[in-house]
Image (spheres, rainbow, N blue to C red):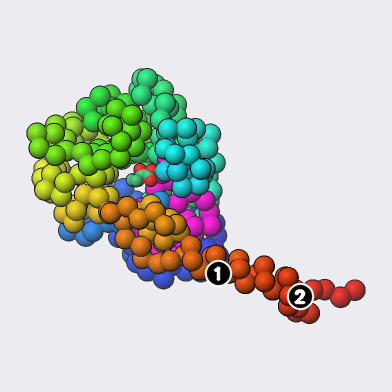
């Protein structure tokens, strides 16, 4: 899975496994120890190498690739072939983080057999685990995948693949819906998930679910009581002007990139690049 040496050198930060690769038992033990887990998305080897060197515990090859990289308005158009390519790129660059790849819409809902065939492709591309969306109706698929040796991360709350039934990008689990969310969380834990993402869930509901489960919860817009947090890397790094309430920009990488491109173009136009140190003589 890993390249012999990261282009970013040895990792500069520790993850839950110290200097060793993160394996499933470490992630499960982290909850019992009260160690918060870190997860970020990546869709290619370039960014995956940077996040791995930064000591991320988990790297998610999210189907948010549809919105972030492929120019779609949702995750729905993302294909399994696209996820396989992205997973291969990420896994090729990661030396320590646990790589989780999303099963895209339409590749696991029909039957446990369909889910297994799709998940096998992602594991062969280098994923350590797969993620799928939904509660109790996904229990059979989760059982089939875990029986086949494939760890499964669940995803409850706002589940982007169901945007059409959820009526848009909105908080889930308010009021009586909180009980259903808890029941779904317990059902997929019983089916064997290794943990679950809670997306856009009231923080009190996320706290209740986290308390009720033995497996870790990873929040995004779900408050501070989850066992870990996940962000989409382009939101975290400030690549665009998109600032969802639940994301914090820890940098302004988009501005830095735009400035570098401006300076490059200006240097070419004024003739200061390339300079002698950039060319070869006969
Ligand atoms: O696809 C994705 O990026 C996700 C995260 C929002 C958890 O599922």
Q: Residue at x 35, y 55 (%)?
A: 243
Comparing 161 with 139, the one in front is 161
Residue occupying the far right of the picture: 282
Q: Which residue is mark 2?
A: 271
Classify 10 Å Cα crowding around label 1: few (below 14), some (14-19), many (20 and above): few
Point 42% across, 37% down: residue: 75
Look at the numbered disc 2 and say if its residue's Cβ is closer than 8 Å to ligand 1. Answer: no
Q: Magenta residues, as a range?
A: 42-63
Is 11 located above or below residue 142 in the figure?
below
| Residue located at (18% from left, 32% from top) | 184
- Is residue 56 highlighted in magenta? yes
Is label 1 in a helix, a strand or a loop? helix
Q: Nearer the viewer, residue 161 or 100?
A: 161
Residue farthest toward the bottom in the current orientation of the protein: 276
Q: Nearer the viewer, residue 161 or 62?
A: 161
| Residue 107 visible from this viewpoint | yes
Residue 205 in percent (x, y) is at: 13, 44
Can the viewer see residue 196?
A: no
Please tell me whether residue 280 is drawn above or below residue 233 in the rendered image: below
| Left or right relative to 69: residue 274 | right
What residue is disc 1 on?
259
Taking depth in this image into account, of 128 and 159 the one nearest to the observer is 159
Could you say which disc has been placed on residue 53 in the image? none
Identity of the residue drawn at 52% across and 43% down: 70
Q: Secondary structure at mark 2?
A: loop
Q: Quadrant of the C terminus?
A: bottom right
Marks 1 and 2, the one that precedes in the sequence: 1
Quadrant location of residue 157?
Answer: top left
Magenta segment includes 61? yes
At label 2, counting other C-alpha atoms closer than 10 Å, the crowd grade (few under 14, some 14-19, many 20 or more) is few
Q: Residues under labels 1 and 2: Cα distance?
A: 18 Å
Where is residue 273? Give x, y as percent. Answer: 73, 74
């Amino acid at each position: 899975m890993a390249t012999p040496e990261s282009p970013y050198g040895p990792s500069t930060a520790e993850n839950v496994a110290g200097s060793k690769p993160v394996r499933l038992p470490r992630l499960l033990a982290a909850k019992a120890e009260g160690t918060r887990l870190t997860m970020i998305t990546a869709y290619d080897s370039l960014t995956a190498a940077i996040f791995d060197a930064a000591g991320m515990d988990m790297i998610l090859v999210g189907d948010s690739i549809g919105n972030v990289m492929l120019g779609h308005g949702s995750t729905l158009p993302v294909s399994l072939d696209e996820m396989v390519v992205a997973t291969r790129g990420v896994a090729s660059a990661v030396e320590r983080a646990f790589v989780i790849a999303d099963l895209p819409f339409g590749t696991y809902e029909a039957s446990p057999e369909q889910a297994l065939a799709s998940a096998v492709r992602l594991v062969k591309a280098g994923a350590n685990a797969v993620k799928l969306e939904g509660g109790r109706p996904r229990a059979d698929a989760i059982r089939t995948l875990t029986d086949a040796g494939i760890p499964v991360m669940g995803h409850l709350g706002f589940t982007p693949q169901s945007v059409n039934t959820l009526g848009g990008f909105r908080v889930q689990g308010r009021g009586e819906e909180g009980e259903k969310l808890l029941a779904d969380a317990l059902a997929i834990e019983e089916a064997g998930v290794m943990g679950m993402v809670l997306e856009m869930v009231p923080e009190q509901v996320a706290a209740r679910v986290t308390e009720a489960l033995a497996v870790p919860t990873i929040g995004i817009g779900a408050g501070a009581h989850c066992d870990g947090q996940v962000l989409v890397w382009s939101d975290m790094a400030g690549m665009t002007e998109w600032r969802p309430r639940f994301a914090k920009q820890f940098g302004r990488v988009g501005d830095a990139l735009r400035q570098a491109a401006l300076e490059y173009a200006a240097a070419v136009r004024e003739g200061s690049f390339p300079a002698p140190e950039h060319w070869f003589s006969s």
